[in-house]
Image: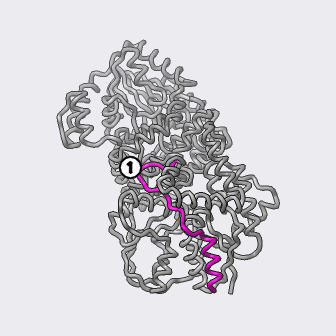
Amino acid sequence: MEDINLFVPCLVRQFLPEVGMATVQLLRHFGYQVHFDPAQVCCGQVFINWGQLKRAKKMARAFLRTFEGPALVVGPSGSCVAAVREKYGLLDLEKAEFEQWQDLRHRLFDVLEFMQQKGLKVRGRLDARVAIHRSCHLLREIGLDVVESDLWAGIEGIRVVYPEHMAECCGFGGVFSVKMGEVAAGIGRRVVQRLVDLEPDVIVVPDAGCIMQVRSVLDAMHKDIRVLHPVQLMLQAING
Amino acid sequence: MAEFRRGAKNLRRNAKTAARRPELGAVISRATDHAIIRRREVMQEIDFAAQRRRIQQLRQNATQNLPGLLDRFKARVEAKGFHFHMAVDTNAARRIVIDVAKRHTVQTVVKSKSMLGEEVGIREALEQAGIQVTETDLGEYIVQLNHEPPSHLTAPAVHLSTGEVGEILYKQAGIGPFEKPEQMAVAVRQFMRTRFFNADMGMAGANALIAETGAMLMMSNEGNIRLVTSLPRLLVVLTSVDKLVERMADLAPLIRVIPKNATGQRITNYCTVLSAPRQGQEVHIVVVNNNRMAAAGDPVFGQAIRCVRCAACINVCPVFRTIGGHAYGTVYVGPMGIVLTNALHLDPHARMLSDACTLCDACAQVCPAGIDLPGLILHIRSSGNPRLIDRFKAWVVGMTYAGAGRFKAAFWALRLFKRLFAAGYRRLWRMLGWTGRRGVPRVAGKTFDRMWDDDAKGD
């Protein structure tokens, strides 16, 4: 059994623990031995996007230390993974840390990306109309289109729908969501309304920040539609 | 020119006001959706990635060599009988244009839409000199009548609904009242004819200046540029130095890509290449710098000068699509506006514009000049925020995130607070800035760490 070190993004740890547990169960389902080190810290994305690079560098150092070693690192967040892989370059890391980073970059994956690369297929059944929101960083930085991917191919009964003309940001944007709260909410209302218009049984959102935003907007719209991470939906399909 | 400063400072307030008008976002997103859908269709006909490489290369070559190209362009146009003027900044540009107008005792001007004209405030300057200026692009004419600046590079009145446009035309110009856009367009067209025939001077911008031949590319959908440039005996072309390209052949990818990228049209209706003055016509070319030559040499912002003003980044920007262009308070809006304003004015105030971005990367994917817009916006954010309160917030959050222990303790406290004061918990989020019409994030009753431990015990 191959070992996987679990990277649990801070929002998942505190707001969406069920997404983290679903990731664990799914990886176990595929035969991996999952480890979790509770000493891990935020990857620093929030500070990078805030423009607080000094603070981000400190976070990055601790993050690199936690995930040293040869094991694969997998976590449920395209944007955190993309931040570590692509944006640590902005942090002016010292030589030793830079090498740690180069080593980690190639064994750190978003869980959905990992499934794709390893050809891990979920087989099961789920009778539901599923509206998919394509989170920006997973789509544009990791390069994984949750709609076009074959992640759903082995699930019978599932009907996937999505806003076809563009994958528009949900308005979360990390620190943007509290710096320009009203605008974030305005974007959210428009984008979530389009998902609601598809009349889904479930809305699927592949990133923790986006899940938080979509749920908050649905709350204000008094819409009782479940918002799940793809790994949660896959687990449901497996368990029938 | 402290306008961009005021705009950047007031951005958050203005954006908030705009975001509270969902009908504004509805009008803008509907119009831009239209362009996005058509763009996707027509882009299938070309290899966008290859065209983008070509445009990036030709724009890079040009912007790295502006002084040389400018000299060649000047020599070529003067040899053909154009009058050439270099304007170092806004004031110089205004002075040159007004001098030309006064020398010819100009009373009426017909003008085509030009972002540089907005940057320089040329219409206001001419009006202050007692000259009547008519915007001849339909959208630009509407915003002129409504006494407001354009809210989008290529679609100046995109923030107005059909009903609002009908009302403006009727109330401000006595045209109509009409309900259908087609009726309005026909009526304005009729009205414009007399303005064209009676104008003393035409004013146009340019999409590209060709150094090799001393010619100028002008693109329009309404045909108004051809009338502006050919009917009056006096013509001023007001343009900027970054529009220079080296060769005539460089126009091909621009003409091929810009309309597809901007509005999803295969080609702009009218592509005019002005290569010499007509007989008996006097043409002045005013090339404005406004810090572009220096910015082009900047190691970070230099790439922003490659922008070809197609506005595709604006169409896909979730922030623009929600608040429109006016909330930015700057001439150039959306992702390219944030970046270009900072490139042209290395000013701490301009940095505040970088708030208006979710870093979703949608703009980077459509930029035909390969400008790393989100990367530059991130660079602007990390150049130091002039707002003390933001720096303080960042410090507080930074302290709570500084170690695994503190992180746990902070959220333990939040969880406790939520259990004790449900209403206070909501208010706390609002205070943090999680505002607007949405609920607040619900901190989980049990952390992942607890669930993991429980799971381990269960095994």
- The subunit carrying tag 1 is B
Q: Nearer the viewer, residue A111 or B417?
A: B417
Q: Nearer the viewer, residue B150 or B96?
A: B150
Element carrying mark 1? loop
Residue extent of the magenta highlight: B433-459
Task: Name, please, the residue furthest toward the left.
Answer: B177
Q: Quadrant of residue A221?
A: bottom left
Q: Is residue A207 left or right of residue B160?
A: right
Q: In this view, does B114 lie to the left or right of B291?
A: left
Number of numbered callouts drawn:
1
Task: Name, please, the residue furthest toward the front.
Answer: B420
Magenta highlight on residue A137: no
In the rendered image, residue B85, in percent from the top left (x then y), is placed at: 53, 23
Residue linked to disc 1: B263
Magenta highlight on residue B453: yes
- For the C terminus of chain B, which image quadrant? bottom right
In the rendered image, residue B234, in percent from the top left (x then y), is placed at: 38, 21
In the rendered image, residue B223, in percent from the top left (x then y), is placed at: 32, 38
Q: How is the image coloured?
A: one colour
How crowded pointer 1 is (Cα within 10 Å; few <14, some 14-19, many 20+) is rated as many
- Viewer can see residue A184: yes
Relative to B74, residue A125 above or below: below
Residue sitting at x 42%, y 27%? B277
Residue sitting at x 37%, y 12%? B105
- Viewer can see residue B365: no
At label 1, the amino acid type is: Thr
Q: In which quarter of the image is residue B155?
A: top left
